[in-house]
Amino acid sequence: MTGNTRGAQAQSSAPVGASDAATRVQWLRDELDRYSYEYYVLDAPTVPDAEYDALFSELQALETEHPELLTDDSPTQRVGGAPLAAFDAVRHRMPMLSLNNGFEDDDVVNFDRRCAQGLGRPAPAAEEAPQDLFSQADASAGAVEYAAELKFDGLAMSLRYEHGKLVQAATRGDGETGEDVTVNVRTIKAIPLKLRGQAPEVLEVRGEVFMYRADFDKLNERQAEAGEKTFVNPRNAAAGSLRQLDPRITAKRPLSFFAYGLGELQGADRPVTHSVMLDGFAQLGLPVCTERKVVKGVQGLLGFYREIGARRDQLPYDIDGVVYKVNALAEQEQLGFVSRAPRFALAHKFPAQEMTTVVEDIEVQVGRTGAITPVARLAPVFVGGVTVTNATLHNEDEIRRKDVHIGDTVIVRRAGDVIPEVAAVVLERRPADARAFVMPTACPVCGSHIEKLEGEVIARCTGGLICAAQRKQALLHFAQRRAMDIEGLGDKLVEQLVDQGIVRTPADLYKLGVMKLAALDRMADKSAANIVTAIENSRAPVLNRFIFALGIRHVGESTAKDLAKHFGKLQAVMDADEAALLEVNDVGPVVAQSIANFFAEEHNRQVIEDLLASGVTPSESEPAARVPAPLAGKTFVLTGTLPTLSREDAKERLEAAGAKVAGSVSKKTDYVVAGAEAGSKLEKAQALGVAVIDEDGMLALLAAGAEQPDAG
Ligand code: 9MJ
């Protein structure tokens, strides 16, 4: 983690010579609470973790030395205490509601109509219904105003704060009575033990405890390594973690929280709208999701649904839909409830990310480096918005751990933009003739021996480039856009070229003529000519792309860039020994050895020699030390559509100038480059006072070298 002066300033503003432990303890708690607020609510951390940890340790030490100073709401009091025998029942003072679901556009049209009618507004005209979704008609006066937000897939929770202190956390249960999980919830760092600012006498906040996908993946990895049961999805992981009777286990689970509703409130007026209420929650230090919008009428609702639907895979957490709520609380009251669900709200669901289907077979695939991946062939199933027929089983250990047999009914999960996977087996539905998978001992493509090295999880085909499967993957890797960028050289073509023995190594591509290509199946003269041109145009790659294209194990785009920058010339990379390689930024012993092994291999050197002989000339530059990096140390975030450059190009140019390009805006961002239709990142930059520039501004910086960003 990079250094940051903010914490140092904060520390130096500590009470001078704080001999008074009580003052110091209070100051430490305030600082730690503020850092948590910046991290969890603003999503803009200002201090490195190590600094937080140091302040935390100091507070712990002081509290041990002065136990009389210890309070329940101290940040040190999150670690779970002794296990419970059972959870107590909690009667909700205001019922915790559930939501009515909608699936089709029509359900939303009807919801909006019912709301409008219930509020005595003119009913939205029939012609505004789905066929005319984007007319502006109902953005006019009569349309109902809604707060649109995400529907998180976690566990609903009610948090009770009295005089700003968290006193109780309860699950939804049946809506009337839930379970007291206070000791567990206190371990969730995103949930403040103490509210910021002026807190009302009593505040009951409703929201969802959930897990970020990345945290879920890490948790499952840890569970698998420890030989413990893994979780099917983040929802189950969140629910399982909260229902632990031993809070010390919950404390180790990476749980998060978003607030979205209000229960009891005393000592303050109820807010006028749902959106103002959420803003108020954030001010009190409660995490509120920023993916929300106030919209009008059915078109506003469906617009939000489509916008979020398009980005669902890129969100860092699972959602199973969006939620629409009439924005004005007075109008919510006017509409009331039917049984346990409010008339003023609707959950508009997305296609399910999990479905069950049958494993018809398990086959193995051979990757570029010979890695053998078992793949389940599935009865087609519609999941996460696409029809899935294959799901990865990762490796043999994973098959054993999940106990997947051929013939089993399984839960297939496709969440985020990751490839579909078998999440779990439905054991009750295992047929009598289900068969266990047996790992082949020979490569199904080239017949070479399959080996699994001691301590490795992945089995590999030992065939190297004599294996057609590896050769095909290596060629596809070489030709891909981020490598040599040979447009048109896709799966089908590579398949034919390798199977017919026309191409063995990447160097053979440069000997292809139009005649030879045009003779292939489904290849028109024009396409053949285009491919030959694309191959021609790839003869002068920048060095880092060429290195990446070689497909060296452990050398991704980023390492390829580091190598190119460090050594400047291909020959220098090829000649470097492990010691020299270890001097490259981010290159450790495993990567260094992999690179050295690759270039030590005679047939790899031969391929490179052939490539150079056929006219491929990677760019050369001076080694890093002598190359000026005008934007070194500067962090950029790109957002919106730039007028001339693609995201990829802009990123590449910035990185070539030494800048770092990050995915989200924080206080550490130096510049946000905003194009057309820039969204929340731009807003965040403005809120944080980060300098915002356009493409011209960025090009000027690249030309001139970095200047100090505006203080904003
Ligand atoms: C979820 N699950 O994200 C509600 N929810 O409101 C949101 N759930 C809800 N709102 C009233 N965003 C009852 C449930």
Image (spheres, rainbow, N blue to C red):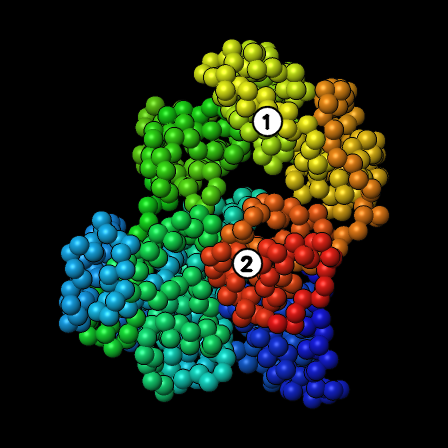
Residue found 45% across the figure and 64% down from its top: 290
When asked about the image quadrant of residue 379, the answer is top left
Q: Nearer the viewer, residue 231 or 647?
A: 647
Q: Nearer the viewer, residue 338 or 653?
A: 653
Q: In the image, residue 671 lies at what x, y percent? A: 62, 61
Q: In the image, residue 343 lies at what x, y percent? A: 21, 66
- Asked if the residue at tag 1 contacts the one at tag 2, i.e. Cβ–Cβ closer than 8 Å, the answer is no
Helix, strand or loop for disc 2: strand
Q: Which mark is residue 660?
A: none
Q: Residue under circle 2?
A: 674
Q: In the image, residue 14 lies at what x, y percent? A: 70, 83
Q: Is residue 601 left or right of residue 217?
A: right
In the image, residue 110 sits, relative to residue 72, either above or below, namely above
Residue found 75% across the figure and 86% down from its top: 17
In the image, residue 136 sits, relative to residue 607, either above or below, namely below
Q: Residue under circle 1?
A: 534
Q: Residues within 10 Å of mark 2 (few under 14, many from 20)?
A: many
Q: Is mark 2 within 8 Å of ligand 1?
A: no
Q: Is residue 646 left or right of residue 258?
A: right
Q: Amino acid at mark 1?
A: Ala
Quadrant of the snapshot with the N terminus: bottom right
Helix, strand or loop for disc 1: helix
In the image, residue 423 sits, relative to residue 283, either above or below, namely above
- Residue 513 in view (yes/no): yes
Q: CA distance from mark 2 to mark 1?
A: 32 Å
Residue found 47% across the figure and 29% down from its top: 375
